[in-house]
Image (cartoon, coloured by chain):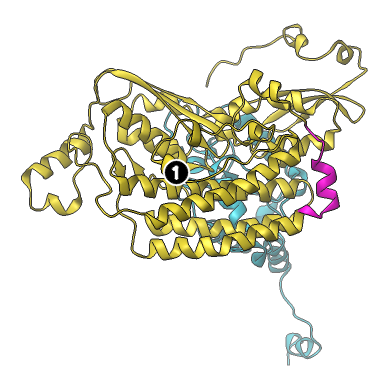
Chain colours: A cyan, B yellow
């Protein structure tokens, strides 16, 4: 008779601190309300009635970077916008994650020219890339779930 | 990276009033990631307490270099970029671009293709206005509008997905016609949409027309007179909300708009509320156009037969050597229109969208210039918002329906 079995009868679940923290982080991840271009429209669709991201605890978009955990770079990042995006990222409190939504944010997409950053990973570290031009809301939700999977595997010793 | 030029404060001093220099008024930065700017618009506000003294829009945060990139692509490739300009109106952008190419090459478009183009462009207008209604009402505190409008917007996107396989960036309208004919389910799906929509529009009216907060925040706010509209060269619902019945679909009909019977909704007040009414009534008019176009949708080909410019259908390639050669030529080199220049303008959901195209007789355009409505309409923001409260600025900026991809291109 271990402690776990006894505690289970009392309605108590035992787990590791790591798992508990990661679980709470995935289920209340606040994305930043910040769109750049076409992908932002699909991001809004993902928030709206048909796709409803709140099923995954992602409905609370924060307009301020200081209150958000996740930056979804939705759209092409121009050279003029790049310093702003970096500043927003710097203002977010750790732990923070970045999803590059769409081809433009991932690699420049069809705009291989002087104006567009060839991938937002030139300025901020990206956790998940979502392909598509623009990606369907399902694709964005898949990207978010992939990020959740990644967060669940994070280790305390790496937090630093 | 481009060089960043240091600008001294003296160079920018003329943008704000003298009172800002003495610290009597406050300079406040709004954007470029402010959610109510609908994208990446930056507004430099000069405020006297809560009252707006001046607004200086700063654009270019979404500059994409479309015009320059188009010069290095051939005519079919450059069209793909037009979808992403004004990303709420991809079909309309495609249509404008294709009309320009067709004018340059003197291509004829079969009547069936023209009718389908009109249907798709009007569906796009409805979806754009729905998105505008949802987000602008959300900005003014009506959260549920966002959810309802997006519900209906999905219906339009489903139709686009049905015809082209893509929800937003379809590139379905091609020079000389359409990519392919619409599937058999198209007519029934659009008719279902037509049947459902009038009741939904009434729902929006019920939600907003008696909403005291919404009315207070829109009526009498951001007044724009007829003279202002003409002086700034504005277009679209902004000018129609000031009582000017100007619509390019009526004034210079394209793609067979003259075959359909519809009205231009106008309101003389020129405030945010008038512009909101114009857009809602335009949705009803668009439904009328779609219904008429569906009722007399002709049968026939959807692509021009001119093999110099328009690729042959897939089925011909297997049996005809000539078709194979045309296909190969068109998809490797592209086509070469005669030298010359054209300007074509259409009515986008935001106003006059124009494409100026110059050809030097090679397979790539020499110059593609885009005249975009948001860029022009944005000039009116300072005029509309002076002496209003900063909270009203949200409604005013929303009321011109800015799409920064359209303004910066």
Residue lying furthest top: B10
Residue appearing at x 83%, y 38% in the figure: B391
- Nearer to us in this view, B217 or A152: B217
Q: Position of residue B313 (x, y in %)?
A: 20, 49
B293 falls in the magenta region: no
The magenta segment is B209-222
Q: Position of residue B58 (x, y in %)?
A: 67, 24
Q: Is residue A98 visible?
A: no
Q: Is residue B144 visible?
A: yes
Q: Is residue B293 above or below residue A5?
A: above
Q: Residues within 10 Å of mark 1 (few under 14, many from 20)?
A: many
Q: Is residue B381 above or below residue B328?
A: above
Residue appearing at x 39%, y 46% in the figure: B117
In the rendered structure, the answer to whether residue B129 lies left or right of residue B144 reads left
Number of marks: 1
- Nearer to us in this view, B355 or A130: B355
Chain under label 1? B
């Amino acid at each position: 008779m271990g402690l776990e079995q006894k505690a289970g009868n009392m309605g108590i679940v035992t787990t590791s601190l790591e798992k508990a923290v990661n679980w709470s982080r995935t289920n209340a991840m606040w994305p930043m309300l910040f769109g750049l271009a076409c992908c932002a429209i699909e991001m809004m669709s993902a928030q709206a009635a048909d796709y409803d991201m709140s099923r995954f605890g992602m409905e609370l978009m924060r307009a301020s970077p200081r209150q958000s955990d996740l930056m979804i770079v939705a759209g092409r990042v121009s050279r003029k916008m790049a310093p702003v995006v970096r500043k927003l990222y710097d203002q977010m409190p750790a732990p923070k994650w970045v999803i590059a939504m769409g081809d433009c944010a991932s690699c420049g997409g069809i705009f291989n020219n002087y104006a567009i950053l060839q991938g937002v990973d030139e300025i901020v570290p990206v956790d998940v890339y979502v392909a598509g031009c623009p990606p369907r809301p399902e694709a964005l939700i898949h990207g978010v779930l992939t990020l959740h999977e990644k967060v669940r595997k994070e280790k305390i010793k790496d937090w630093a | 990276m481009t060089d960043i030029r240091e600008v001294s404060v003296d160079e920018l001093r003329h943008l704000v009033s003298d009172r800002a220099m003495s610290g009597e008024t406050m300079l406040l930065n709004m954007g470029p990631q402010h959610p109510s700017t609908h994208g990446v618009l930056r507004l430099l506000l000069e405020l006297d307490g809560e009252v707006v003294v001046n607004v200086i829009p700063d654009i270019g945060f979404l500059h994409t270099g479309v015009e320059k990139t188009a010069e290095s692509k051939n005519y079919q490739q450059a069209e793909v970029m037009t979808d992403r300009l004004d990303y709420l109106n991809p079909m309309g952008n495609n249509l404008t671009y294709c009309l320009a190419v067709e004018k340059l090459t003197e291509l004829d478009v079969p009547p069936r293709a023209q009718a389908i183009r009109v249907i798709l462009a009007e569906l796009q207008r409805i979806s754009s206005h729905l998105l505008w209604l949802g987000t602008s009402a959300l900005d003014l505190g009506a959260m549920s509008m966002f959810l309802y409008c997006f519900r209906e917007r999905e219906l339009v996107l489903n139709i686009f997905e049905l015809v082209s396989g893509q929800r937003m960036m379809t590139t379905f309208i091609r020079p000389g016609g359409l990519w392919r004919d619409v599937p058999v389910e198209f007519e029934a799906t659009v008719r279902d949409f037509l049947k459902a929509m009038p009741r939904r529009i009434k729902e929006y009216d019920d939600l907003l027309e008696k909403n005291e907060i919404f009315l207070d925040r829109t009526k009498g706010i951001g007044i724009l007179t007829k003279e202002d509209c003409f002086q700034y060269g504005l277009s679209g619902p902004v000018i129609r909300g000031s009582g000017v019945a100007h619509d390019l679909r009526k004034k210079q009909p394209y793609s067979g708009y003259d075959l359909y019977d519809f009205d231009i909704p106008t309101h003389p007040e020129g405030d945010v509320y008038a512009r909101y009414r114009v857009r809602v009534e335009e949705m009803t008019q668009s439904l009328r156009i779609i219904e008429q176009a569906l009722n007399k949708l002709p049968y026939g080909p959807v692509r021009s037969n001119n093999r110099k410019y328009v690729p042959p259908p897939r089925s011909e390639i297997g049996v005809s050597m000539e078709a194979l050669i045309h296909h190969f030529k068109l998809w490797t080199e592209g086509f070469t229109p005669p030298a010359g220049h054209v300007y074509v303008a259409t009515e986008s959901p935001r106003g006059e969208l124009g494409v100026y195209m110059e050809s030097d007789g090679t397979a790539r355009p020499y110059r593609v210039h885009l005249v975009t409505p948001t860029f022009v309409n944005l000039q009116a923001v300072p005029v509309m918002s002076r002496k209003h409260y900063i909270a009203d600025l949200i409604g005013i900026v929303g009321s011109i329906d800015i799409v920064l991809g359209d303004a910066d291109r």
